[in-house]
Image (tube, grey):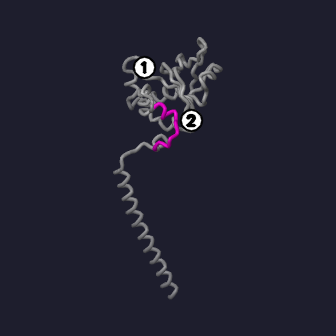
């Protein structure tokens, strides 16, 4: 009889602690759900960490008045985090004028949310793993791009042409290099 009372007491205490724990869990779960629903959706990742002073291919583009269209496109495609990775990354960065040379309405159409995948494909066609100088690029016939396609490299009048685009300038970054180009590269259609 004493053993039954003792077991009953142990079960009662255990039940009490379990019910208290469940009540706390439910309360904290409910309050965290409320907090989560009340918080605004924030974009996260390396690209959104406060500036630590290192220069990335993304920060170079953001800091350039000649690449505002490119930056808007990168943001619309949500590719910022890819451009701050350790790399090395070689980015062929079309100028605003290069985007303006596209048929009227092309950029506006690509920036629409429903065209995010097509825009991302085009932008990835401007990125190659590596960190090659303009002169070193003359040694290639083609480059494998981040969208799994290849871009043709030709040497015309001693200058490398990437997919028909001329390299206007090159800027070194902590995670690669940015080659400023005068044309938007369009991936081959399948």
Q: Do residues under tags 1 and 2 come within 8 Å of each other at their CB atoms?
A: no
**Which residue sits furthest front?**
53
**In terms of image quadrants, where is residue 29?**
bottom left
How many labels, in total? 2
Q: CA distance from mark 1 to mark 2?
A: 26 Å
Q: Nearer the viewer, residue 54 or 96?
A: 54
Classify 96 as above or below 62.
Answer: above
Secondary structure at numbered mark 1:
helix
Q: Nearer the viewer, residue 130 or 177?
A: 177
Q: Which residues are magenta?
A: 50-61
Please state the horizontal and vertical placement of residue 160, each as a whole percent of the image: 59, 17
**Which residue sits furthest top?**
157
Please state the horizontal and vertical placement of residue 59, each as a whole percent of the image: 48, 35
**Which residue sits furthest bottom?**
2
**Residue 60 located within the stretch drawn in magenta:** yes
**In terms of image quadrants, where is residue 137?**
top right
Q: Nearer the viewer, residue 137 or 78?
A: 137
**In terms of image quadrants, where is residue 74?**
top left
Point 43% across, 74% down: residue: 16
In terms of sequence position, does the residue under pointer 1 or pointer 2 come before the other? 1
Q: Nearer the viewer, residue 165 or 53?
A: 53
Tag 1: Cα neighbours inside 10 Å, few (<14), some, or many (≥20)? some
Point 42% across, 63% down: residue: 25
The disc at residue 97 is 1
Secondary structure at numbered mark 2:
loop
Point 40% across, 23% down: residue: 107
Classify 43 as above or below 104.
Answer: below
**Residue 22 located within the stretch drawn in magenta:** no
Residue where numbered disc 2 is placed: 175
């Amino acid at each position: 009889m004493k053993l039954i009372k003792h077991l009953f007491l142990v079960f009662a205490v255990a039940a009490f602690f379990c019910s208290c724990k469940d009540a706390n869990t439910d309360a904290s779960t409910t309050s965290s759900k409320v907090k989560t629903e009340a918080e605004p959706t924030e974009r996260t990742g390396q690209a959104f960490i406060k500036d630590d002073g290192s220069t990335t291919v993304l920060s170079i583009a953001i800091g350039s008045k000649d690449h505002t269209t490119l930056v808007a496109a990168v943001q619309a495609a949500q590719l910022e985090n890819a451009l701050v990775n350790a790399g090395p990354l070689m980015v062929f960065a079309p100028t605003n004028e290069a985007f303006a040379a596209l048929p009227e309405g092309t950029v506006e159409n690509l920036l629409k949310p429903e065209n995010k995948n097509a825009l991302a494909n085009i932008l990835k066609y401007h990125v190659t793993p590596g960190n090659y100088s303009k002169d070193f690029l003359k040694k290639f016939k083609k480059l494998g791009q981040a969208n799994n396609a290849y871009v043709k490299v030709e040497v015309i009048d001693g200058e490398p042409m990437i997919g028909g685009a001329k390299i206007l300038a090159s800027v070194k970054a902590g995670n690669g290099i940015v080659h400023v180009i005068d044309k938007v590269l369009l991936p081959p259609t399948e």
